Image (cartoon, helix red, strand yellow):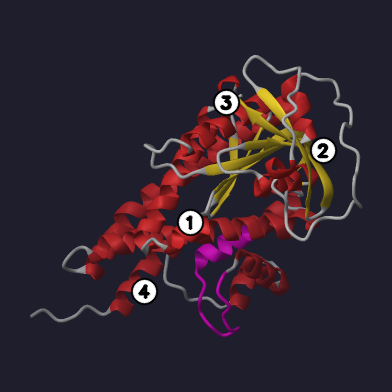
Amino acid sequence: MSEPTDLGAVFESIEAFLLGGPPNLTQGEVAERADVPLELARDLWRQLGFAHVTDDTAAFADSDVEALQLTADLLRMGILSPDSQAALVRTWGRSYARLAEWQVSLLAGLAVAGPDPDVRLAELAAGVLPRVEALQSYVWRRHLSSAASRLLTTGSPSNPERTMAVCFVDIVGYTAHSKSLEEEALVEWIEGFEQIATGTVVDLGGRVIKTIGDEILFTADDPVAAAEIALALTERGLDDDNPFPAVRAGIAYGLVVNRLGDVFGPTVNIAARLTSVARPGTVVLDRGAYLALSGVDDEPDEFEADAADEPSPAAQTPEDEGTDDSSGADLPGYRFRRLRRVSVKGYARLEAWRLKRPKDG
């Protein structure tokens, strides 16, 4: 029987490979070599989410010195301003931490499938990671190109606000269904949802902002694109022969603040609230989305308040208290049903319309 391999030695070898050399520098030594104040270096490492080490721990390598020098260069060039530095660095740290966790889990899973996991892991690290690194750089550059194109055609570098459609799509009954699944089946179910939803968003002209477990958030410059995506996903979820889960969606259209790849503002909040009260398999719109899709210049306020404008203890489902009144200004591809106002957190009397195709009317 062969002697067991020293896993500690294997890890040290992989760590040296990843860092470009064995860690032999302390925090102070890295900061001194990079000619950067130690407090700034510590703050950057903390925001990146790196593990805390003591002052006398040799946990850094020459690559850390180079990275700190590059960061200092960006600060001197004004690329990383004091206002944006912390937020941008935190975003980098969170994004790469999640990616690294997934990649290590993937490699470890491949390694344990063989007779010598430690040796196999070292081989995978040396053979796979350089290719992954190159692909990550490629993907990043492609997204830079796309983002620059969108900014030049639809935005202003000095103004983070843009008018766009925001849509949330979430799985109906996720909590109950997830309790009945084993871990592996649950992961497969969620990954299937994310894969199909992401592909549909991209194919029909939207941009995925993020996925949050059982929910996906996307935006579209064209409200028609957002409507088509939401309808495609809800219709797919209603097909009993399709493994895609039943979903519901909420769309709002208006000014949105773009920041570090995420979106903020009342338009985003309203889209989330509408999703929370939509019935399974339905798409619910706010006033802005309704006006943009219907072509109506404005809609008179038909519903007068019949109670104090206070939110109810629980979110109402708009169809439950709605009306079958249909808009007379339907586009050829859509029909709209105005719903009675709903009370949700932050919005006491939120206007809503259900979006549907003519065949559903």
Residue 45: image x %, image y %? 62, 68
Q: Is residue 314 left or right of residue 311?
A: left
Viewer-side residue, 319 vs 241: 319
Q: Is residue 354 left or right of residue 105?
A: right
Q: Is residue 30 left or right of residue 195?
A: right
Q: Helix, strand or loop at disc 2?
A: loop
Task: Name the quarter where the N terminus is drawn.
Answer: bottom left
**Mark 1 → mark 4, Cα distance in angstroms:** 21 Å
Q: Residue furthest left?
A: 1
Q: Which residue is mark 4?
A: 12
Q: Earlier in the sequence, mark 2 or mark 3?
A: 2
**Mark 4 → mark 3, Cα distance in angstroms:** 62 Å
Q: Helix, strand or loop at disc 4?
A: helix
Q: Which residue is mark 2?
A: 158
Residue 231: image x %, image y %? 57, 31
Residue 357: image x %, image y %? 59, 23
Circle 2/circle 3 CB separation < 8 Å: no
Please determine whether, in this image, residue 232 is positioned above or below residue 315.
above
- In front: label 1 or label 4: 1
Q: Earlier in the sequence, mark 1 or mark 4?
A: 4
Task: Name the quarter where the C terminus is drawn.
Answer: top right
Circle 1/circle 3 CB separation < 8 Å: no
Please determine whether, in this image, residue 239 is positioned above or below residue 171.
above
Q: Helix, strand or loop at disc 3?
A: helix
The region drawn magenta spans 50-69
Please determine whether, in this image, residue 234 is positioned above or below residue 65.
above
Residue at image coords 71%, 18%: 330
